[in-house]
Image (cartoon, rainbow, N blue to C red):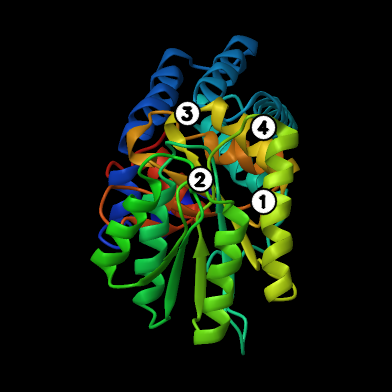
Amino acid sequence: MGLISFLKKKFGSKKEANNKYVVGMEKSRKQFSSRLKSLAKKYEKVNEEYFENLLQILIEADVGVNLTFSIIEATKKEANSQGISDPTTINEILVDKMFIGYLQQGEDIVNEITFVEDRPTVLLIVGVNGVGKTTTIAKLAKRYQNMRKRVLLVAGDTFRAGAVEQLEVWAKRLNVDIVTGKKNQDPASVAYDGVARAVRESYDLVIIDTAGRVQSKAHLMDELSKIRRVISRQIEGAPDEVFLIIDATTGQNGVIQAKAFAEATGLTGVVITKMDGTSKGGIILAIRDEIGVPVRFIGLGESLDDLEEFDLEKYLYGLCLGDDDVDI
């Protein structure tokens, strides 16, 4: 059974459970899946031109150049070895290779934060300005509040105008505690104070916001390294998680950002925001391929409950099938 048939069988009768991915991926699906279907209708048998068109569709979906060529070559190889020339079958093989392309960086992926016993678990949030960091922090806080975890927010973005106030509004709305510093205070000192309070008052989870400035790679490395150092002075081995927030609508610029942050600090996961706002859903595959870090969560809407654990099968179902469940 190919992946498309498997996804139809698994999710086709459970649309309600998969609804957030189906709705949130609608723009990407209309662009990606419809183009595959239209292409298949134009050919009775595939040829080199057909594969060139597939390559263009993947690149324009922000799958990334390197991974796109790898997926196309793997699709060609399987088609040739099995003597397959039917366009719809080729498209299904393509989706199989997209699935494999994500997993080739590692299959042992845990999306939820693994909490450390006997001390606060520290989550550091990084990313450039405007990608939805503050809102994502609020969504994560709400998620773990719902799991009965005591959450402490730390407003470490002391440079962007309104950043601290924005996080304070969310903290009040969620009824969670927050540690803030003064305007232009060293973010590392705010992080230090926040972790110290978390230890002292036995919080389960500390979520630390950071400044989204990328003046230069060296500056970014220095700032994040300093924050990590002061955190580890309070808790050996912390931070336990470092999540990079990427706006899906930024496309390949998001991949460039991911590379810069991956080199600057040890990322443990990526959170993709605004997935419902892009027609180019392939960025998830590109980021996984380029930096080797798993996507842990995906934002599929504006409400606090629209942050979902990333699920590769649901993602591909939402991208390729959705409500239609028809062949691609």
Mark 4 to mark 2 CA distance (whole Å): 47 Å
Q: Earlier in the sequence, mark 4 or mark 3?
A: 4
> 67 left or right of 91?
right
* Mark 3, residue position: 250
Instruction: Please tell me which of labels 3 and 1 falls first in the chain.
Output: 1
Q: Where does label 1 land, which residue?
A: 103
- The residue lying toward the viewer, choosing from 219 and 238, is 219
For the residues labelled 1 and 4, the Cα–Cα distance comes to 12 Å
Q: Nearer the viewer, residue 96 or 281?
A: 281
Query: Which residue in the structure is indicated by mark 4?
Result: 71
What residue lies at 51% left-to-right and 25% top-to-bottom? 87
Residue beneath disc 2:
184
Q: Residue at image x 49%, y 82%?
A: 203
Residue 160 appears left or right of 119:
left
Q: In the picture, residue 268 is in which quadrant?
A: bottom right
- Looking at the picture, how far across and down is residue 171, in whole percent? 32, 64
Q: Looking at the image, do the residues carrying marks 1 and 2 touch, with CB atoms under 8 Å apart? A: no
Residue type beneath disc 4: Ile
